[in-house]
Amino acid sequence: MSLTIVTGGTRGIGAAIAARLAAEGHDLVLGYRSDEESARATAESIHARGVRCVTVRADLTTDAGIEELFARAAEVGPVTGVVNNAGATYRFAPLHETPTEEIRRTIDINLTGPILVARAAVAVLDRGGVIVNITSGAATIGSPGEYVHYAAAKAGLDAATRGLGLEVADRGIRVVAIAPGLIATDLHATTGDPERVARMAPQIPLGRAGQPEEIANAVAWLMSDQAAYVTATTLRVAGGR
Ligand code: NAD
């Protein structure tokens, strides 16, 4: 039996990951921040696939939120995997125009939160398992003029993937990351630029934005036994960018 926590699992890339893992037979605990409507709709479609699905509203920039997520998961059963997918960009702007508070918030949700979630995951994966961190191609591009601090946070999560993967390899826990490129989700509109995907797609070597399901396919593979020899590394799924 697989029981997987997916943070930010009720919309966008996270919802696609949830759907794909449900198709593989995983029971799911899906975290989300505030979008009740997406949570209800995603849970309904996951239930229709015949697996268990619990949604947990919790702010993962708080200790209480992380504790709540893992406490609710423990009620479902022993956790076998965690997908650290929740993340946010908030605004597109050069760094010198970005308020301190926003930089801190961005690093909280894209780096500190995922590291705390990974720490909690290691504590519950006492029979081994898999942690997948969703980072970003931004980590190596640097995202000048858009969100340098977000790119830095994601680069930090890549580094944590490497370090933690080595640290817990002998406990049977694999820690891997996926660095998506431009993916067609609501993140871009939420951040204030609904045209961004269409505008940037031609710059991608493969000539288009990726779909959330293409990230989900990679997650499913990394969580499966087919990737049993893969750990402490980042897989880029970015159309060549
Ligand atoms: P999205 O905005 O559709 O979803 C983000 C999810 O994160 C939501 O479910 C939300 O509830 C959750 N979340 C945000 N803040 C939270 C908080 N404080 N506490 C708990 N949950 C919180 O975005 P998406 O495009 O699906 O992005 C998913 C992941 O992929 C993110 O980590 C993002 O940085 C990364 N990513 C996205 C793209 C892209 O082009 N869309 C590219 C590279 C990486």
Image: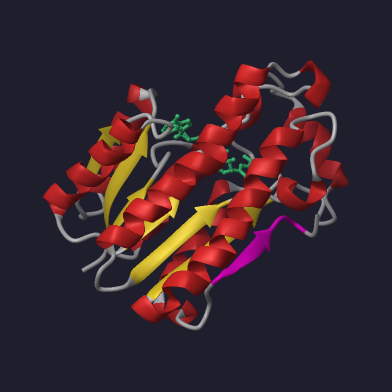
User: In the image, residue 223 lies at what x, y percent?
Assistant: 42, 68
Q: Quadrant of the N terminus?
A: bottom left
Magenta stretch, residue numbers: 232-239
- Residue 6's place in the image compared with 191, above or below, is below
Answer whether residue 19 is visible to the viewer in this image.
Answer: no
Camera-side residue of 152 and 144: 152
Closer-to-camera residue (181/152):
152
Q: Residue at x 41, y 46 (%)?
A: 116
Image spot of residue 17 (x, y percent): 44, 52
Residue depicted at x 80% and y 43%: 142
**Which quadrant would residue 172 be assigned to in this image?**
bottom left
Q: Is residue 237 magenta?
A: yes
Main SS of the magenta part reads strand
Measuring from the top left, give residue 22's x and y in whole percent. Answer: 32, 57
- Position of 164 compared to 71: left or right? right
Q: Is residue 14 above or below residue 88?
A: below
What x and y, as percent, mark residue 152? 70, 43
| 117 and 76: which is toward the camera | 117
**Residue at the outermost bottom position:** 229
Q: Is residue 186 magenta?
A: no
Name the residue: 62% across, 58% down: 159
| Residue 209 appearing in the image | yes
